[in-house]
Image (cartoon, grey):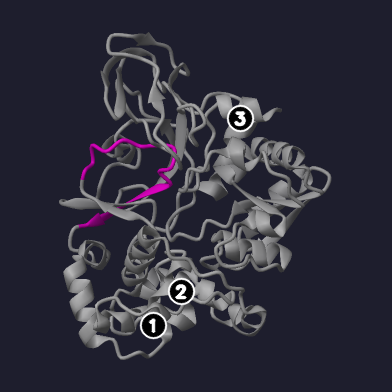
């Protein structure tokens, strides 16, 4: 399989980032790692895809190995999934192995995963390729193996629904349509966390379209504590943080990037709130924040929000063009990383998610879409440029948008057959 085929199929990182896969696999690496850790609470998509489409996923991983010229490939999956591991072992290709991971958060973070698999620390500001590794998502491998335009998105629908499930739906259908496959919301005034409880975003717009990077939908009642955390305004975060943070340091002790030796210390970012976000010694390390949210959701005993303080600093530094070139402390991971991982079961309790069923079996039912809305930006890079106009008739799988010349991006295809009724920053197709 060639890079050109992957590019023409519009394959992107399906784990949430949306980096164009043809660009990633054009590199050369020593090892390619399948990220099946899926450590976001209540989400089960990757495990279910391996269970039901294991042959195809492994075929996609092998294609990736050959393209990057890696000597070996590794499936990183939680050791607790014994049934999936036992199912995969007889199907492994030559030079392919399984690495059993701890049931902890954030086991799926690329930097943590690479360290667990290879023992190598990715330096601050670098990417896995800097230590000879390429990381591939489960659904990304599946899409690559199928050699067809990406028109379906797999995701888990969980939380306050009648029957939590993992499904595959046409790109561009609404959140509401997908949630109906889980029996609908089980609470009267539902809202959503899109992508996960830890690294997702809040939404109350059930008409939003599902894109290539929609990793999961968690339905919650409006009065759930997580909704308060995700909707707290910056003024409150800043004011309360400046007045209440006692510099206990727990946020830093839990930070996975700090534990890898990176120079990020969230408690120092909190200290900067008392000085109008000033002082590079307290803020510049935030450029290495991975936004895992452990500092806020798990560590802080006062329910403050170090994560949003770090990310606000991070974006301010990026806007100012400030960078800190530094090496990681290699001793910190050996001393502390193994002892400070957060068990998923404990995290679920802390987040107030224990009341929901922590399952997500794959079902074949899907949405019979009569209309889809396809954003022109479903990937890292520049928005794609529409190649259709209002009134055009398209078939399912037809190209409707292409990256601009020399721009980083991905091809977008029609997920249903029909007529184009809108072309703006989205393309709307009605059957």
* Viewer-proximal residue among 111 and 186: 111
Residue 423 spot, x, y in % from top left = 28, 21
Which comes before the other along the chain, label 2 or label 3? Answer: 3
Which comes before the other along the chain, label 1 or label 3? Answer: 3
Q: Secondary structure at mark 1?
A: helix
Q: Quadrant of the C terminus?
A: top left
Q: Is residue 417 left or right of residue 98?
A: left
Q: CA distance from mark 2 to mark 1?
A: 9 Å
Q: Which residue is mark 1?
A: 268
Please provide the residue range marked out in magenta.
Answer: 205-221
Which of the 4 image quarters holds residue 238?
Answer: bottom left
Which comes before the other along the chain, label 2 or label 1? Answer: 1
What residue sits 30% from the left and 74% below the top?
Answer: 305
Residue 384 is one of the magenta-drawn residues: no
Q: CA distance from mark 1 to mark 3?
A: 43 Å
Q: Can residue 52 be seen from the camera position used here?
A: no
What residue sits 18% from the left and 58% below the top?
Answer: 222
Q: Which residue is mark 3?
A: 6
Q: Can residue 87 be seen from the camera position used here?
A: yes
Q: Is residue 89 left or right of residue 46?
A: right
Q: Are marks 1 and 3 in contact (CB under 8 Å)?
A: no
The crowd level at tag 2 (other Cα within 10 Å; few <14, some 14-19, many 20+) is: many
The crowd level at tag 1 (other Cα within 10 Å; few <14, some 14-19, many 20+) is: many
Residue 119 spot, x, y in % from top left = 71, 68
Q: Are marks 2 and 1 in contact (CB under 8 Å)?
A: yes
307 is higher (above) or lower (below) than 138:
below
What residue sits 61% from the left and 58% below the top?
Answer: 81
């Amino acid at each position: 399989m060639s890079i050109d085929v992957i590019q023409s199929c519009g394959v992107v990182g399906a784990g949430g980032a949306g980096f164009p896969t043809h660009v990633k696999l054009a590199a050369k690496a020593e090892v390619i790692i399948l990220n099946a850790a899926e450590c976001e609470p209540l989400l089960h998509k990757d495990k279910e895809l391996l269970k039901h489409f294991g042959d195809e996923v492994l075929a996609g991983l092998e294609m990736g190995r050959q393209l990057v010229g890696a000597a070996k490939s590794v499936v990183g999956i939680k050791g607790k999934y014994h049934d999936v591991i036992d199912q995969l072992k007889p199907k492994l290709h030559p030079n392919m192995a399984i690495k059993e991971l701890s049931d902890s958060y954030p086991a799926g973070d690329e930097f943590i995963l690479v360290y667990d698999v290879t023992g190598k620390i990715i330096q601050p500001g670098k990417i896995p390729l800097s230590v000879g590794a390429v990381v591939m998502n489960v659904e990304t491998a599946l899409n690559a193996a199928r050699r067809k335009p990406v028109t379906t998105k797999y995701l888990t629908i969980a939380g306050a629904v009648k029957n939590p499930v993992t499904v595959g739906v046409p790109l561009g259908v609404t959140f509401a349509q997908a949630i109906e496959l889980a029996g609908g919301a089980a609470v009267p005034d539902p809202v959503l966390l899109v992508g996960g409880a830890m690294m997702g975003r809040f939404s109350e717009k059930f008409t939003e379209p599902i894109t290539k990077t929609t990793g999961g939908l968690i339905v919650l009642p409006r009065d759930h504590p997580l909704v308060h955390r995700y909707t707290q305004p910056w003024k409150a975060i800043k004011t309360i943080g400046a007045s209440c943070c006692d510099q206990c340091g727990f946020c830093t002790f839990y930070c996975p990037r700090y534990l890898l030796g990176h120079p990020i210390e969230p408690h120092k970012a909190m200290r900067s709130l008392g000085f109008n976000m000033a002082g590079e010694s307290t803020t510049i390390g935030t450029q290495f924040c991975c936004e895992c949210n452990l500092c806020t959701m798990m560590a802080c005993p006062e329910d403050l929000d170090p994560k949003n303080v770090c990310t606000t600093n991070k974006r301010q530094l990026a806007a100012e063009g400030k960078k800190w070139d530094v090496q990681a402390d290699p001793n910190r991971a050996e001393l502390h990383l193994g002892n400070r991982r957060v068990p998923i079961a404990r995290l679920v309790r802390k987040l107030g998610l224990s009341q929901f069923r922590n399952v997500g079996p794959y079902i074949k039912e899907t949405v019979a879409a009569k209309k889809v809305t396809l954003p022109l930006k479903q990937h890292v890079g520049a928005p794609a440029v529409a190649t259709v106009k209002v009134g055009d008739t398209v078939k399912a799988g037809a190209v409707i948008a292409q990256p601009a010349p020399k721009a980083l991006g991905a091809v977008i295809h029609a997920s249903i057959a029909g007529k184009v009724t809108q072309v703006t920053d989205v393309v709307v197709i009605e059957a």
